Image: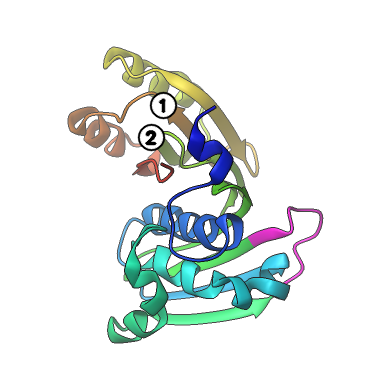
Amino acid sequence: MGLLDMIGPVMVGPSSSHTAGACRLALLARHLLGERPRRVEFGLHGSFAKTGKGHGTHLALVAGILGFTPDDERLKESLSLAEKEGLEVAFKAVELGDVHPNTVRMVLEGEKERITVTGSSLGGGLVRIFDLDGFEVRITGAAPTLVIRNVDTPGVVARVARILADDEVNIAYLTVSRKKRGGEAMMSLEVDRPLPEVPLRYLEHLSYILWVRQIPPVTD
């Protein structure tokens, strides 16, 4: 355990969970969209809905969508900066059931893509995205992460694992989810280092791969 594990992340704002964590969740969501967001709706659950404004949660979420980190001084001006960039932002309170009280559901729209991302701020700046478009995922921002949407056909997971192994990229954690057999599926892979550009592009061009996102770490 290091010093930052005890005192929390370097950040702008009063709360590691409501400010730094919120910013990191939104930053991960921006990476998952894979393009510049044009519109985002934040559904705030539990403590995020009740005390978020006082802790700067709204500012932090918008800052993350803009690509800022929790220690960026521009976080305090994120709403006005979003307006200048033409980013449409909306907030509402939602009830998401039996989840962590610091949870947000984000619906992001870009020029081509639209995704729904749900994640929680767990305290101390730690976060976890657990749902992407209705698929179970595990994205913590603590390590490079590959997120792959694919057609559910036999051998896909093994093929992806082989491509990573050929480039000596080790898988630390793997989550696989599907809605129905033979439909679409999603896998999230936390890895020890980013996958190089050439095998990443190769993955994208496989017939059963719908899209690939390589997410950089967002924690200190």
Secondary structure category for the residue under label 2: loop
How far apart are the alpha carbons under marks 1 and 2? 6 Å
Quarter of the image that includes the N terminus:
top right
Taking the spot 41% from the left edge, 63% from the top edge, the residue there is 64
Numbered circle sitting on residue 144: 2
> In the rendered structure, which amino acid carries the disc numbered 1?
Val
* Residue placed furthest toward the right: 98
Image quarter of residue 137: top right
Left or right of 16 in this view: 36 = left
Q: Is residue 36 above or below residue 129?
A: below
Looking at the picture, how far across and down is residue 93, in whole percent? 69, 76
Is 164 in front, or is 50? 50
Looking at the picture, how far across and down is residue 183, in whole percent? 56, 43
Numbered circle sitting on residue 7: none
- Cβ atoms under marks 1 and 2 closer than 8 Å: yes
Quarter of the image that includes the C terminus:
top left
Q: Residues within 10 Å of mark 2 (few under 14, many from 20)?
A: many
Looking at the picture, how far across and down is residue 209, in whole percent? 38, 39
Color style of the picture? rainbow
The answer to if 140 sits in the magenta stretch is no
Which stretch did the figure color magenta?
A: 94-103
> In the rendered structure, which amino acid carries the disc numbered 2?
Pro
Looking at the picture, how far across and down is residue 149, in whole percent? 45, 43
Image quarter of residue 85: bottom left
Q: Is residue 187 above or below residue 25?
A: above
Magenta span: predominant SS is: loop
Taking the spot 49% from the left edge, 39% from the top edge, the residue there is 4
Q: Is residue 183 visible?
A: no
Is 154 in front, or is 202? 202
Name the residue tied to disc 1.
Answer: 191
